[in-house]
Image: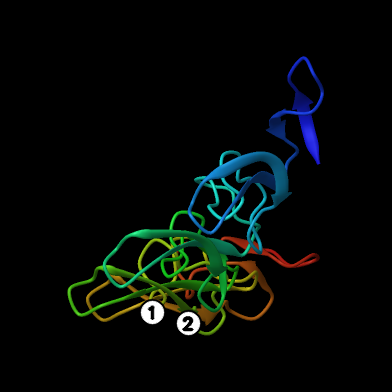
Amino acid sequence: NCDNCYYDHTICDSCKNGFGFKTDDDGQTSNECAPCTDHCNYCSQNNTYCNDDSCESGYGLVYDQNGVRTGRCGLCPDFCYSCRSNSSFCDECFDGYGYILDDNNENTGKCGPCPKNCERCNNNGNKKCDDNGCFQGFGPEIGDDNQKTGNCKACPINCQSCSENADNCSSCDSNYGF
């Protein structure tokens, strides 16, 4: 598990990925390599403390109730693709999901489903579809105030796309024209 040794081959200088220097109960490190904590790819100096941005995909660094890093990796929130810097705050939601916003429109770090017929809703929170975020064959619904509502609505019949306005076809299905 040792990647590089000093001149006498009995003292390890660096450990392979997935391993770090073994730490005893008193917090002293040795020159022996041991596996990193669960879901940690790189723990170079101490096998019980995961390095920054070194948790496996779908996991992030864990902080205690006082905001102090524990050195461990924890599972990302539901529907979250990446949370590397903090296991309780999502950096990137799965496709079809967006950030849940609080009452002040601040990102909560959690992910929720996009509106119906919407593929991407990361820019405006999970309650409003992003521009060009509707599925093929759907377009943005326009409200009475001529503004996008954040919802997606089916394009007109025989219409392939209506990316700017669900009521106005921008390209027709094959064998159909304007």
Mark 2: amino acid: Pro
153 or 123: nearer the eye?
Answer: 123
Count of numbered circles on the image: 2
Q: Quadrant of the C terminus?
A: bottom right
Mark 1: amino acid: Lys
Residue 134 screen position, x and y as percent: 54, 70
Q: Is residue 52 above or below residue 61?
A: above
Residue 165 screen position, x and y as percent: 45, 68
Q: Quadrant of residue 149?
A: bottom left
- Please tell me which residue is depicted at 78% across the width and 31% down the height of the picture: 3
Residue at the top extreme, as displayed: 7
Instruction: Find residue 19 and name its label.
Output: none
67 or 4: nearer the eye?
Answer: 4
| Res. 132 in view | no
Q: Quadrant of the N terminus?
A: top right
Instruction: Find residue 115 and name its label.
Output: 2
Question: What's the colour scheme?
Answer: rainbow
- Please tell me which residue is depicted at 47% across the width and 66% down the height of the picture: 87
Name which of mark 2 and mark 1 comes first in the sequence: 2
Q: Is residue 94 above or below residue 22?
A: below
Q: Is residue 104 above or below residue 3?
A: below
Residue 89 screen position, x and y as percent: 41, 66
34 or 111: nearer the eye?
Answer: 34
Q: Which residue is mark 1?
A: 127
